[in-house]
Amino acid sequence: MLLQLLRSWGSRCFVVVGEVVVAIATPVVVVIGALVVAIASTVVVVVGAVVGAVVVVVGAVVVVVAAVVGAVDVVVVGAVVVAIATPVVNGYWGSSRCSCWGSSCLQLPKQLLGQ
């Protein structure tokens, strides 16, 4: 009888202890879960913002590089055109096909002067 009473009381004790543990653990787990979600959300937002900023900076760098490359292209093409055109023009205007005309002695092609 005493053994049966102890068993009955012991099982009730375990049930009560279990209910107390569950009652304490449930809000703790809920709070920890909420904190984890809040921290994870913040981390995701911050990482997203950083990645977005990096993408914007990389885009700006690409635009600047493209502008520099474009400017260099224009300068290089201009230099090539000048390098090719200068001897051609000098060869033409300095040749015997030009005549001295007017008081300022402009070099004009004989074709323009009708000669």
Image (tube, helix red, strand yellow):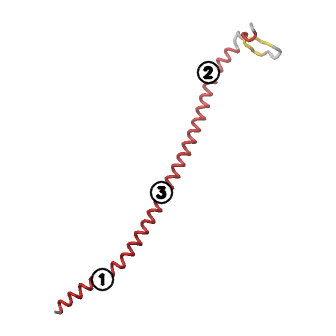
Q: Which quadrant of the figure contains the N terminus? A: bottom left
Residue 52 image position (x, y, % from top left) = 51, 52
Whether residue 21 is situated above or below residue 101 in the rendered picture: below
Q: Which residue is mark 1?
A: 17
Whether residue 68 is situated above or below residue 45 in the rendered picture: above
Residue 15 image position (x, y, % from top left) = 27, 82
Which circle's residue, 1 or 3, is located before the other in the chain? Answer: 1
Residue type highlighted by circle 1: Val
Residue type highlighted by circle 2: Ile
Identify the residue shown where x is 65% and y is 18%: 87
Q: Which residue is mark 3?
A: 47
Identify the residue shown where x is 60% and y is 28%: 77
Quarter where residue 22 is shown: bottom left
Q: Nearer the viewer, residue 54 or 37?
A: 37
Q: CA distance from mark 1 to mark 3?
A: 44 Å
Residue type highlighted by circle 3: Val
